[in-house]
Amino acid sequence: MSFSAQTKTELCAIPVSRDCCAVAEAYGLLLFAHTFSHTEIAVVTANEALAKRVPPLLTRAFSASIQSQEKGAGGRVTLKITEEKQLRRIFSKLGYDWQYHMTYHLNRNIIEDDCCRAAFLRGVFLAAGTVAGPDKKIHLELATSHHALCREVMSLLLDMNVNPKFAMRKTVSLLYWKDEAGAEDFLTLIGAQHAAMELMQAKVEKQLRNKVNRRVNCETANLIKASNAAAEQIAVIHQALNKGGWEIFPDAMHATIRLRLEHPEMSLTELAAQSQPPLSKPGMSHRLKRIVAMAKAAVQEEHT
């Protein structure tokens, strides 16, 4: 089951406690359904939970009943109402004139309360929404072929501080979110808390992985840098010893030089701890810089 299907199944388990919210959810569902006209209503879905939710929802909202239920390819089910009496009742309830061809505009009088707005948007998503799973890039969209309606729903969402972006895909108008916060806010608003939590958890896991990777990369870079520095120190010390022997270094430096030569894998911190008496890391760094400077000077003198 896709993440979109899981989310719709989750939404279909939400009980509708108020009659006004039943009307609002059914309104969103019908506006974005396959067909919503003065001659036919058709809801097409491959989601079993949605196919079971629609009939009682329409009955409660409009005292309407599904007249035919057809099964098609890919498990898709088409639920239809074609009876004039029922269509008239539905249109009247939603504030439309049944005698004229349906114009797809949003009647905000149906969704004045916050609970009804959330229910309406739940119906919209059930009919025309998709959301990418937490293992993919964030993308949630609502699609319709009715441009004016899409703009009006966008205005509603903006009023609710849930800010989608708008786009056209050929003849289809889209409202979409590509940011985690926006998608999570919309899913939470319509009641899909579990889906929103999955997206949030995936975001946190991704952030942690990135943080760990950055830390590993940083530590790797530091190790490479320290290894290169150690190799340079050892090479120039050997070169100086081959040219002039231990006499070119003060006696006080001999123990540090031996420590560096005998432990090429050690970091500055480890070398400082092994020193007798122990040194601080900056102290060890300063001493090695002096040794390297002396070694380079001795090698250069040998070449002049």
Image: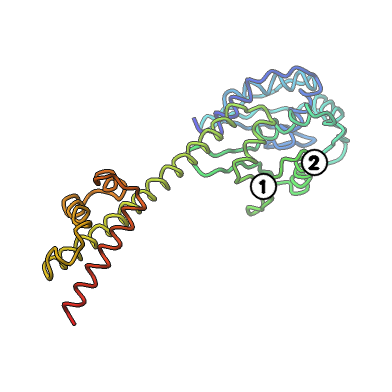
Report the disc number at residue 159: 2
Q: Is residue 34 above or below residue 116?
A: below
Q: Categorize mark 1 by other alpha carbons within 10 Å: few (<14), some (14-19), many (20+).
A: many
- Left or right placement of residue 196 versus residue 215 in this view: right
Q: Of residues 292 and 136, which is closer to you in this image?
A: 292
Q: Of residues 187 and 261, which is closer to you in this image?
A: 261
| Image location of residue 74, percent across then percent down | 51, 33
**Mark toward the start of the polypeptide (1 vs 2):** 2
Question: In the image as oriented, which residue stretches furthest toward the bottom?
Answer: 304
Q: Is residue 168 above or below residue 62?
A: below
Question: Amino acid under label 2?
Answer: Asp
Query: Which quadrant of the structure image shows residue 96?
Result: top right
- Left or right placement of residue 86 versus residue 200 in this view: right
Report the disc number at residue 108: none
Q: Is residue 133 visible?
A: no
The residue shown at (29%, 63%) is: 290
Residues under labels 1 and 2: Cα distance?
A: 18 Å
Mark 2, secondary structure of its residue: helix
| Image location of residue 257, percent across then percent down | 20, 56
Q: Is residue 283 visible?
A: yes
**Residue bearing the label numbered 1:** 174
Q: Categorize mark 2 by other alpha carbons within 10 Å: few (<14), some (14-19), many (20+).
A: few
Question: Amino acid under label 1?
Answer: Leu
**Tags 1 and 2 touching, CB below 8 Å:** no
Q: Of residues 146 and 42, which is closer to you in this image?
A: 146
Q: Is residue 165 above or below residue 64?
A: below
Q: Of residues 131 and 51, which is closer to you in this image?
A: 131
Query: Which quadrant of the structure image shows residue 14?
Result: top right
Q: How is the image coloured?
A: rainbow
The residue shown at (87%, 33%) is: 109
Mark 1, secondary structure of its residue: strand
